[in-house]
Amino acid sequence: MDKPKRKPLRLPGYDYSQNGAYFVTICTKDRAPIFGHLVGGGLRAAPHVALTSIGAAVEQAIGTIPEINPGVECNIYCVMPDHVHLMIVLTGRHGGRPLPEIMKRFKSYTDHLYREASGAPLWQRGYYEHVIRNQADFYSAAEYIHTNPARRLEQQTNTP
């Protein structure tokens, strides 16, 4: 019996090692909400994710992306309960390491941390990425990342 063919995740012929910005989303295996839970949204606190220990470890690993990959910036990100949004920027100093390799290293490292504790895989196969094409696209993606907890909390409170 033939398995269904998966749709390619990357743009055909695109050079993912070139300088530029990429909006990346990685989902947990089976969209399990293991990174934390949404809190806030009242008068005292803006909506945010209260991270679990694995959520905090993933956030800490995001901070090491530029250290491990010189010339790669990742200053805009959001760890949600069941996924992570990242803005990855490859600068002229990044040495040509392509985005798929950077993401593979990040996912492999964090998956290893999680498997040691739980014995289960952390991530779904692959990841979603959007090539940022201009300044307006950059600002739109950055706003989406920053406002994701508030939107998700609003969705949860408005769901019957």
Image (cartoon, rainbow, N blue to C red):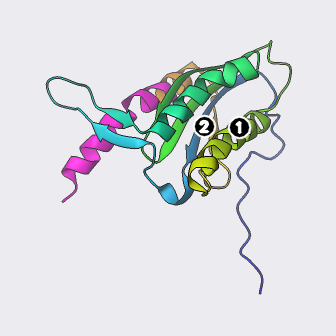
Q: Are marks 2 and 1 in contact (CB under 8 Å)?
A: yes
Camera-side residue: 26 or 14?
Answer: 26
Camera-side residue: 59 or 8?
Answer: 59
Which residue is painted at 27% across and 36% down in the image?
39
- Residue 56 against residue 44 in the figure, above or below: below
- Where disc 2 sits, the SS reads strand
- Where disc 1 sits, the SS reads helix
Q: Position of residue 21 (x, y in %)?
A: 66, 25
Q: Quadrant of residue 63?
A: top right
Q: Quadrant of residue 109?
A: top right
- Residue 110 against residue 21 in the figure, above or below: below
Which residue is painted at 46% across and 37% down in the image?
53
Distance of label 2 from label 1 (alpha carbons):
9 Å
Which residue matches tag 1? 103
Which residue is painted at 17% across and 23% down in the image?
44
Amino acid type shown at disc 2: Val
Amino acid type shown at disc 1: Met
Q: Is residue 131 visible?
A: yes
Which residue matches tag 2? 24
Give the residues drawn in magenta, as a range.
Answer: 141-160
**Is residue 101 covered in magenta?**
no
Return the disc, 2 or 1, that comes first in the chain's sequence. 2
Task: Specify the quadrant that holds the C terminus.
Answer: bottom left
Which residue is painted at 75% across and 15% down in the image?
71
